[in-house]
Image: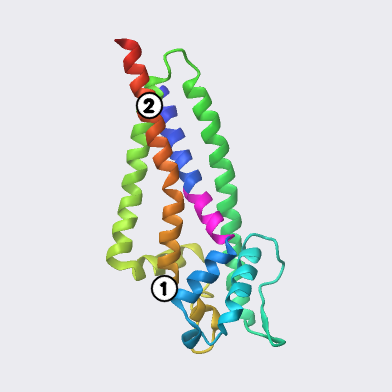
Amino acid sequence: MKKVLGTLAAVCWLVFGITGAVRWTAGDGGLLAAEMLQAAPPETSGLPEGEYPGVGTMTAEYLTGKREAFQYTVQGAEVFQEHEAAHMADCRDLIRLDTIVCILCGTAALLLTACGLWRRDGGRDFLRGAVYGMLGTAGVVLIFGIWAAVNFNGLFVTFHKVAFRNDGWLLNPKTDLLIRLMPISFFVRLGLRGLLRFAAVPAVMAAAVWIGLKKADTKDR
């Protein structure tokens, strides 16, 4: 039973880390603006360089619910069309779901960890179960990582087909600023940034489990 609790706790902690990194990244307007500028400079997007920080901040505030409407004006003119705003509304719904999952998994992880370690033996079986959960989750992440490395475009398209119930994400770079600002290279760069932010969670978990098991072994000697 302890091993099961450890496995579930590890999975919950890792999902908490992944969804937390997504929420953190989506709400970082400075990061969004910087990656837009790198992936889609003014000569390809048509947006003046000085407007990137404003667009990034607006996007982050909209995705995290701090702003009601997805729209930005340049010299009094709105730059996003209605169907672009509609797609971003779908994206905001995903971020809301991500936030809910993050909170639920974080709460579950705390409760499972508390239950698993509430023993004088230091929860050796719990920690061993956590190792299984970490390895299993790492295997799943590795599969998607290989897919992204081999065919990121295929992963990108598959994700959008699964995540969205409509074709609103099929934008035209000739007419839609949103897709010019956020080409596939933008999501590649953003994904790598998010991965770096998430990496702290498994690193801390691995260290905690290793220390816990070492202490348990020391007591047995």
> Considering depth in this image, is 74 or 109 the residue closer to the camera?
74
Classify the position of the C terminus by image quarter.
top left
Q: What secondary structure is the stretch in magenta mostly built from?
A: helix
- Residue drawn at x 57%, y 61% is 28
Start-end of magenta stretch:
18-27
**Please, is residue 25 above or below residue 76 in the view?**
above
Residue 45 on the magenta span: no
Q: How is the image coloured?
A: rainbow
* The N terminus: image quadrant: top left
> In percent of the image, x 36 and y 38: which residue is there?
134
- Farthest front residue in view: 50
- In which image quadrant can residue 64 be found? bottom right
* Residue 176 in the figure: left or right of residue 211: right
Quick one: 55 or 65, which is closer to the camera?
Answer: 55
For marks 2 and 1 on the same chain, the one whose residue lies earlier in the sequence: 1
- Residue matched to label 2: 211
Q: Is residue 23 magenta?
A: yes
